[in-house]
Image (spheres, grey):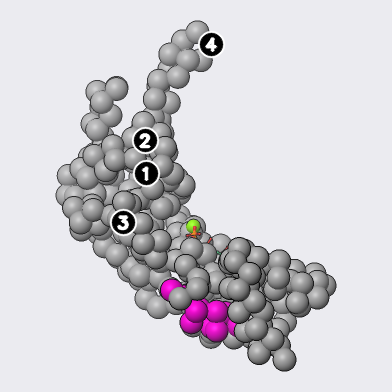
Amino acid sequence: MNDLTHPDLPFYQPVADECAVFEMAQAKALPLLLKGPTGCGKTRFVEHMAARLDLPLYTVACHDDLSAADLIGRYLLKGGETVWVDGPLTRAVRMGGICYLDEVVEARKDVTVVLHPLTDDRRRLVIDKTREELVAPESFMLVASYNPGYQNILKKMKPSTRQRFVSVGFDFPAPEVEVPVVMRESGLAEDPARALVRLAGGIRKLTGMDLEEGVSTRLLIYAATLMASGMPIARALEAAIIEPLSDEADVQQALRDLASAVYG
Ligand SMILES: Nc1ncnc2c1ncn2[C@@H]1O[C@H](COP(=O)(O)OP(=O)(O)OP(=O)(O)O)[C@@H](O)[C@H]1O
Ligand SMILES: [Mg+2]
């Protein structure tokens, strides 16, 4: 078990060979793209790997207003003086650390222009404002995440960008992995954790028909946490699974029916 071999690191239960792929990509200076649905462990995986490789981690949650300057840095006024302040990407390059761009497709287009020379064999970061050109040290690694499930045609990743990354596909873990993760993160006992994961299996089959995306491991942990602190099962399912997944009465009812089938 991973948590026994790496007891001091942020807990991450591997699903397949993703740890080896990450290590190899880092050793060979290749950028890595993590594809997968919300709440399936991507962020935890990066935190775990950064700690395991003993590299500083700079995480950026990308949004539609995020510009190249937010990543690279800008001149700021400080006590009447203008000083240059590095952004998280520049800091990661200077430190030879890991820069994790969460939901990279959300960012503005000018970000792509910055990422391209950094993600091919040039490994260069150009800072126009300070007229610097940094060559990334060997240990520097760019990791990005992307949720292909959103089906947002306006925000698909361009082939010229995605083909600059080695990619690993994430999905919801198999029950043998998900049950111990839910138990460990929430403190819930094994039997109720198994029941939750069984319910999740049923809900995930509905994905695409009624639900945009299946229930995440994150929501299972929320429900488990509420149950472990004494909330009745039905109330915990309502608060942590049914309400977060849908606003529509008929979908919510379908979820309640699934829950009754599992909990009897
Ligand atoms: N394999 C795993 N090992 C340990 N914990 C996990 C694992 N998978 C999921 N988790 C748990 O699920 C929670 C959600 O995972 P995380 O925040 O990493 O998801 P994510 O894929 O980054 O989601 P998002 O796309 O919404 O940012 C974590 O806080 C952790 O508790
Ligand atoms: Mg995340």
Q: Is residue 5 above or below residue 43?
A: below
**Alpha carbons under labels 3 and 1: distance apart:** 15 Å
The residue labelled by disc 1 is 107
| Mark 2 crowdedness (10 Å alpha carbons): few <14, some 14-19, many ≥20 | some
The residue labelled by disc 3 is 153
- Quarter residue 221 falls in: bottom right
**Alpha carbons under labels 4 and 3: distance apart:** 45 Å
Q: Is residue 22 magenta?
A: no
Q: Are marks 3 and 1 in contact (CB under 8 Å)?
A: no
| Residue at the (72%, 77%) spot, across then down | 188
Checking the image for residue 79, the label placed there is: 4
**Alpha carbons under labels 4 and 1: distance apart:** 31 Å
Q: Is residue 201 magenta?
A: yes
First in residue order: circle 4 vs circle 1: 4
| Residue at the (50%, 8%) spot, across then down | 80
- Per the rendered image, the range of residues in magenta is 199-208
| Residue at the (70%, 73%) spot, across then down | 237
| Mark 4 crowdedness (10 Å alpha carbons): few <14, some 14-19, many ≥20 | few
Q: Position of residue 223 (x, y in %)?
A: 68, 71
**Alpha carbons under labels 4 and 2: distance apart:** 25 Å
Q: Are marks 4 and 2 in contact (CB under 8 Å)?
A: no
